[in-house]
Image (cartoon, rainbow, N blue to C red):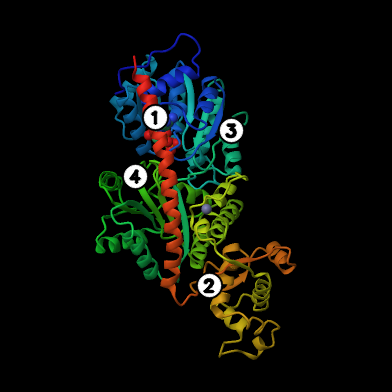
């Protein structure tokens, strides 16, 4: 049943002052932050809005407050039952009349909720996109005065996004059915293309678009190339990373259910409170595990992407990708689950050339339009280019989201220990030429043998190629770095359908640009491979130094912020 107490409605058109007072009385927050006030003002005025605000940025109040202040029922479309339950329970506890209609609600409860809605006693009604698509619900809603329609996690409508939900596609109908009801779509992750797609699909063409900065200064990002494609090696590295963070709460993302179980077991064997979580478990079991994670201090969730949206544990101190995600959007959203309390948190991504092949193989098997697939492939490549690049991580992510003026963060692994790069355009030309001459018949290692003329079982035809031995001036390890980088940049591709993948040429346009030296290839100079432990120590040093400076900085900022909030709060409690 919906809660009983409703908020008093002002007689005149509600404005920002009313919104602020509601924010402090019901939510206990001193003031709006970031773009919240602008978004709220726009929605209060009855105009359509798309708001892209960071995870934890407070998107919910952007629609909850106007829904309460405007006359009528506020309809909220939310993709997950867990998300709906959390929000509705929280609202009820705050004295807001909210209810949800999802598959878990009994028939009796349903009719009670509709009765409350008809009598005007309900401020907010949460529904699933499937429920809404059923049609009958739209008809019932059409009989009610609606204050607004909010579409949470709006990126789910876009196939370019990483959480596509087919049922979200039907939400465009809302524009037709409720032409006079203002609609607000909110999401944390959407690049320019996804934003356009959201506007088009939801028929929000006239909406004002607010995009907050994607900066998350308390997140410290880093990426490490996997030392080999061996799963055992990667698992060992993950265990090492988690051990170094013993007692802290974290999330480890794995690319498969098997991997998830395996890493969780290995972590438990190593004495960590690790919980596996993936879509192979039934909902009850998943909920139990989620509750344990939320309740236990220092628990580590080892999960597939099934674990995500709506998880709101404030003190997640690290997010480790044992396998990289599929795009920069997914990367940012997953890493963004760390440090929601504003305290420092780390995002560490392990990646290797075999992960690209794996990502492409997975995309290949998906039933989707060729055009969509191409976009996803490009997005995956952009992520790998960032991971293997030499640009500040945060800056690279923010540029991707359209923040062209983002400054280096000062705390990521790149900022903390700027890698040396060298101009590898000429070696890259040689490698591309060799792959071309070899006609995609060889794998990575064998291409290197060809370049360095080291192979024993060379055939006469191979020796006659102009590329035989042209790379003898670079060591095999040097070649490995260059070829890996060309794979990360998409200039070379490994056939994803092959257990021992063959290397072929990538995007012809890009390859031509490298041949003509119009595109320069910068490769990071990695420390000598033989002393792999030395390599870690080195980057570790830089990182710790960076972390210390950040800690002081971020802590100071948050202390100031807290003091300010305390001050504001006490001011407001003076009668
Ligand atoms: P998201 O944007 O990820 O959906 P939520 O709406 O779940 O974020 O809000 C995250 C947290 O931030 C909540 O605990 C919420 O109460 C809090 N919050 C929202 N607005 C403010 C504000 N103006 N000041 C302080 N805290 C806020
Ligand atoms: Mg949210
Ligand atoms: Zn940086």
Q: Quadrant of the N terminus?
A: top left
* Vertical order, 564 against 339 (above or below): above
Q: Toward which corner of the image does residue 511 lie, by quadrant? A: bottom right
Mark 3 vs mark 1: in front: 1
**CB of mark 4 within 8 Å of CB of mark 2?**
no
Mark 3 or mark 4: which is in front? 4
Q: Which mark is residue 565?
A: 1
Cα–Cα span, label 3 and label 4 = 31 Å
CA distance for labels 2 and 1: 57 Å
Report the residue marked by disc 4: 315
First in sequence: mark 2 or mark 1?
2
Q: CA distance from mark 4 to mark 2?
A: 41 Å
Whether 363 is drawn above or below 285: the answer is: below
Q: Nearer the viewer, residue 80 or 23?
A: 23
Mark with earlier residue (4, 2)? 4
Q: Position of residue 361 (x, y in %)?
A: 51, 62
Determine which residue is flagged by label 2: 501
The CA distance from mark 3 to mark 1 is 29 Å
Q: Nearer the viewer, residue 410 or 279?
A: 410
* Residue at which label 3 appears: 209
């Amino acid at each position: 049943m919906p809660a009983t107490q409703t908020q008093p409605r002002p007689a005149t058109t509600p404005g920002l002052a009313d919104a602020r007072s509601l924010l402090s009385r019901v939510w206990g927050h001193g003031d709006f932050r970031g773009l919240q006030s602008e978004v709220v003002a726009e929605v209060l005025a009855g105009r359509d809005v798309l708001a892209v605000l960071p995870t934890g940025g407070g998107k919910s109040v952007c629609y909850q407050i106007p829904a309460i202040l405007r006359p009528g029922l506020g309809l909220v479309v939310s993709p997950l039952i867990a998300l709906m339950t959390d929000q509705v329970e929280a609202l009820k506890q705050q004295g807001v009349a909210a209810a949800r209609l999802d598959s878990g609600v009994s028939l009796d409860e349903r009719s009670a909720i509709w009765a409350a809605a008809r009598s005007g006693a309900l401020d907010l009604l949460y529904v699933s996109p499937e429920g809404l698509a059923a049609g009958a619900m739209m008809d019932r809603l059409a009989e009610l005065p609606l204050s607004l329609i909010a579409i949470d996690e709006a990126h789910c409508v876009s196939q370019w996004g990483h959480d596509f939900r087919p049922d979200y596609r039907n939400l465009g109908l809302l524009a037709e059915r409720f032409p006079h009801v203002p609609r607000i779509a909110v999401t944390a992750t959407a690049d320019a293309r996804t934003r356009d797609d959201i506007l088009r699909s939801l028929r929000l063409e006239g909406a004002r678009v607010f995009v907050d900065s994607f900066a998350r200064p308390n997140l410290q990002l880093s990426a490490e190339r996997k030392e080999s494609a061996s799963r055992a090696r990667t698992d060992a590295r993950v265990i090492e990373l988690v051990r170094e963070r013993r007692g802290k709460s974290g999330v480890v993302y794995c690319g498969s259910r098997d991997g998830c179980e395996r890493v969780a077991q290995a972590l438990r064997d190593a004495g960590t409170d690790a919980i596996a979580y993936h879509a192979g478990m039934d909902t009850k079991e998943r909920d139990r595990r989620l509750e344990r994670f939320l309740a236990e201090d220092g628990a580590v969730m080892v999960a597939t992407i099934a674990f995500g949206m709506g998880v709101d544990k404030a003190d997640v101190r690290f997010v480790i990708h044992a396998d990289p995600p599929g795009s920069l959007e997914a990367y940012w959203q997953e890493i963004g689950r760390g440090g929601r309390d504003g305290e420092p948190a780390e995002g560490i991504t392990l990646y290797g050339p075999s992960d690209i092949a794996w990502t492409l193989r997975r995309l290949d098997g998906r039933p989707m339009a060729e055009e969509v697939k191409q976009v996803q492939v490009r997005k995956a490549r952009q992520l790998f280019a960032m991971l293997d690049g030499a640009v500040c991580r945060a800056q690279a992510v923010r540029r991707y989201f359209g923040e062209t003026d983002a400054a280096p963060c000062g705390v990521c692994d790149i900022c903390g220990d700027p890698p040396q790069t060298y101009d590898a355009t000429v070696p890259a030309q040689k490698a591309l030429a060799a792959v071309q001459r070899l006609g995609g018949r060889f794998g990575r290692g064998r291409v290197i043998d060809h370049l360095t003329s080291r192979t024993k079982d060379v055939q006469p035809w191979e020796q006659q190629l102009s590329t035989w031995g042209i790379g003898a001036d670079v060591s095999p390890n040097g070649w490995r770095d260059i070829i890996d980088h060309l794979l990360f940049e998409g200039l070379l591709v490994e056939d994803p359908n092959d257990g021992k993948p063959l290397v072929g040429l990538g995007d012809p346009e890009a390859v031509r640009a490298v041949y003509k030296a119009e595109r320069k290839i910068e490769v990071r100079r990695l420390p000598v491979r033989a002393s792999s432990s030395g390599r870690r120590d080195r980057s570790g040093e830089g990182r710790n130094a960076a972390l210390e400076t950040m800690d002081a900085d971020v802590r100071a900022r948050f202390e100031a912020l807290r003091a300010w909030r305390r001050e504001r709060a006490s001011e407001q409690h003076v009668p």
